[in-house]
Image: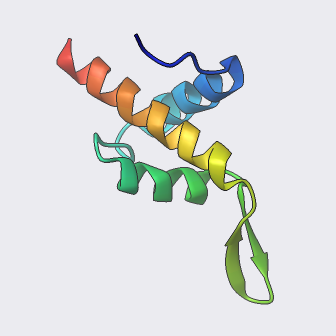
Amino acid sequence: MGSIRQTYIKRVAIDLVRHYPEAFTGDFAHNKEKVLELTDLRVEVDGHARVVYKKLANRIAGYCTRYVKRRRAT
């Protein structure tokens, strides 16, 4: 049985994949960097990037990975 994700996570992930289809792959680590790059979950503090919502970024990147894999399989 799979995990049930919140609608917000699904909506953000699907919107990102649809707007930037070339940016996302089946690799979680790559998708995590792209999510942080394309959203406001990372904040610049004194010239250094700092992830504010790490758990949320991980969940969105994980769903992007699943969504891309499932979409390319069909």
Residue 2, by quadrant, is top left
Give the mark count: 0
Q: Quadrant of the N terminus?
A: top left
The residue furthest left is 73
The residue furthest right is 46
Residue 12 in the image: above or below residue 37: above
Q: Is residue 14 left or right of residue 1?
A: right
- Of 29 and 44, the residue lying toward us: 29
Q: Position of residue 66 (x, y in %)?
A: 37, 28
Q: Is residue 70 left or right of residue 18?
A: left
Q: Is residue 56 left or right of residue 22?
A: right
Q: Position of residue 12 (x, y in %)?
A: 63, 31
Residue 52, by quadrant, is bottom right
Q: Position of residue 27 (x, y in %)?
A: 30, 47
Kindly identify the residue that appears in the image at 54 percent across and 36 percent down: 16
Q: Quadrant of the C terminus?
A: top left
Kindly identify the residue that appears in the image at 73 percent across and 88 percent down: 47
Kindly identify the residue that appears in the image at 23 percent across and 23 percent down: 72
Kindly identify the residue that appears in the image at 67 percent across and 77 percent down: 49
- Of 18 and 54, the residue lying toward us: 54
Residue 48 in the image: above or below residue 29: below
Residue 31 in the image: above or below residue 67: below
Q: Position of residue 25 (x, y in %)?
A: 30, 42
The residue furthest bottom is 46
Residue 59, by quadrant, is top right
